[in-house]
Amino acid sequence: MCHTFALLQCIVLIIILGSLEAFTTTNTCIKTSRGASNLSAIANPLKRRSRTNIIHVESVQEYKEQVVNEKECISVVRFYSQYCKSCQASEPHFYKLASEFSNKDASGIKVNFVEVPLNKNTSILHEALEVPSLPWTHIYHPDAGLVEERAVSKKYINDVRKCLRCYVYGECDMDDAPWDCQEVYGECAIE
């Protein structure tokens, strides 16, 4: 039921993004195999500090390019506001999580980390995705689409880490896991 609802949300988002594409301005993005940056971040020195392994999205079109159309990597999206105290407190923990899941992973599965600030260009995206609070995270799997929605505040970052380990390494040690590792992956990596 939960996965069906997430799939339905993904389909609605793709329809919304498709219809909004004509109304949004196209921002040029540079996407590299690991670190990604966008030209608008370079042009605007007042923008939040940039990390080489975090993709910063500033428009609906960029979100579509970096997350919705991604078919090779798991994407972890952090929705935040630069004025939110909880978002500021959780930011270093999110960056640490991004560094833990760099391309050096033995699993062979790549993980992209994306940040979407709440601003006039992305507010419609926050609303369309029904982001209930900030900071919030979505995890997208390249084959299944949106698979997880979670709070990503400092208090819950370890839950996000465990959940991500499940999708990257097959370690399903979450208390609320709907199935066991063996059923999903064939073998479980947890001792």
Image: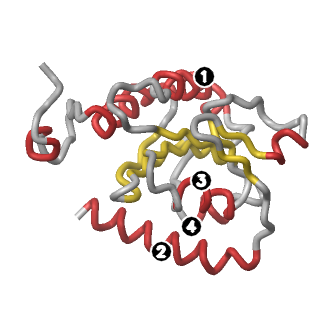
Q: Which mark is residue 82?
A: none
Q: Residue at x 68, y 64 (%)?
A: 61
Q: Name the residue under label 1.
A: 92
- Residue 34, position as x, y percentages in the image: 58, 35
Q: Which residue is drawn at 43% across and 51% down?
A: 140
Mark 3 belongs to which amino acid? Gln
Report helix, strand or loop for mark 1: helix
Quadrant occupied by the C terminus: top left
Mark 4 or mark 2, which is nearer to you? Answer: 2
Rounded to the nearest angstrom, the CA distance separating label 1 from label 3 is 22 Å
The mark nearer the N terminus, 3 or 4, is: 3
| Towards the viewer: 142 or 149 | 142
Q: Name the residue under label 4.
A: 128
Tell me whether the residue at label 3 lies in contact with that at label 2, contact meaning CB atoms closer than 8 angstroms.
no
Tell me whether the residue at label 1 lies in contact with that at label 2, contact meaning CB atoms closer than 8 angstroms.
no
The quadrant holding residue 51 is top right
Quadrant occupied by the N terminus: bottom left
* 117 relative to 19, above or below: above
Q: Residue 12 carries which label?
A: 2
Mark 3 or mark 4, which is nearer to you? Answer: 3
Q: Name the residue under label 3.
A: 66
Mark 1 belongs to which amino acid? Pro
Q: Please rate how many residues cluster around mark 4, counting C-alpha atoms within 10 Å: few if below 14, some from 14 to 19, many from 20.
A: some
Q: Which residue is drawn at 74% across and 38% down?
A: 83
